Image: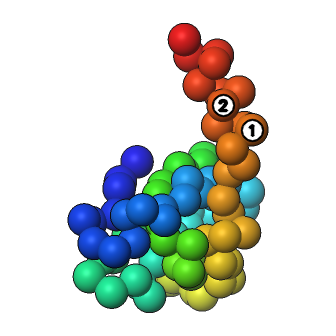
Amino acid sequence: MLPLPSCNHQSREILCFYANRTPNPQIVKITNIAGWEFERVVFPGKSILFQAAPEGLAEIYSFRDAIALHFDQIPCQDLQISDELITSLLSRLS
């Protein structure tokens, strides 16, 4: 999981979750946060946790026949994991 760079977003970062439920590899990109770019491949059936500013916009690209196609745009706030889920997961790790 990658933190945001030390900038004015740090105090407002949120924890986000994305799952690739397609049969194709996908790329998740966040490019609308000044001074920070995020890009990761998420394989079919896999998921990713990442930190982002609430105003971040996740762009999803899906690969089909070796071509990346724009698939979706999702506000990071819609991918945010609830505090209750974070607490529950952390309690299971202890």
Residue 3, position as x, y percentages in the image:
35, 56
Report the front residue among 58 and 60.
58
Who's the residue at 37% across and 64% down the image? 10
Quarter of the picture holding the C terminus: top right
Residue 55, position as x, y percentages in the image:
56, 80
Report the front residue among 41 and 66.
41
| Residue located beneath label 1 in the image | 84
Location of residue 5 (image quadrant): bottom left
Q: Which mark is residue 6?
A: none
Q: Which mark is residue 87?
A: 2
Report the front residue among 23 and 53.
53
Who's the residue at 40% across and 83% down the image? 33
Residue type at tag 1: Glu
Res 91 seen here: yes
Who's the residue at 60% across and 46% down the image? 46
**Is label 2 in a helix, a strand or a loop?**
helix
Distance between mark 1 and mark 2 Cα atoms? 5 Å
Residue type at tag 2: Thr
Location of residue 89 (image quadrant): top right
**Pointer 1 and pointer 2: residues touching (CB < 8 Å)?**
yes
| Left or right: 61 as drawn, with respect to 38 | right
Who's the residue at 60% across and 87% down the image? 70
Vertical side of 25 occupied by 74: above or below: below
**Is label 1 in a helix, a strand or a loop?**
helix
Judge the density around disc 2: few (<14), some (14-19), many (≥20) Cα neighbours within 10 Å.
few
Judge the density around disc 1: few (<14), some (14-19), many (≥20) Cα neighbours within 10 Å.
few
Q: How is the image coloured?
A: rainbow
The number of numbered badges drawn on the structure is 2
Q: Give the residue furthest to the top.
A: 94
Vertical side of 33 occupied by 10: above or below: above
Vertical side of 87 occupied by 72: above or below: below
| Left or right: 35 as drawn, with respect to 56 | left
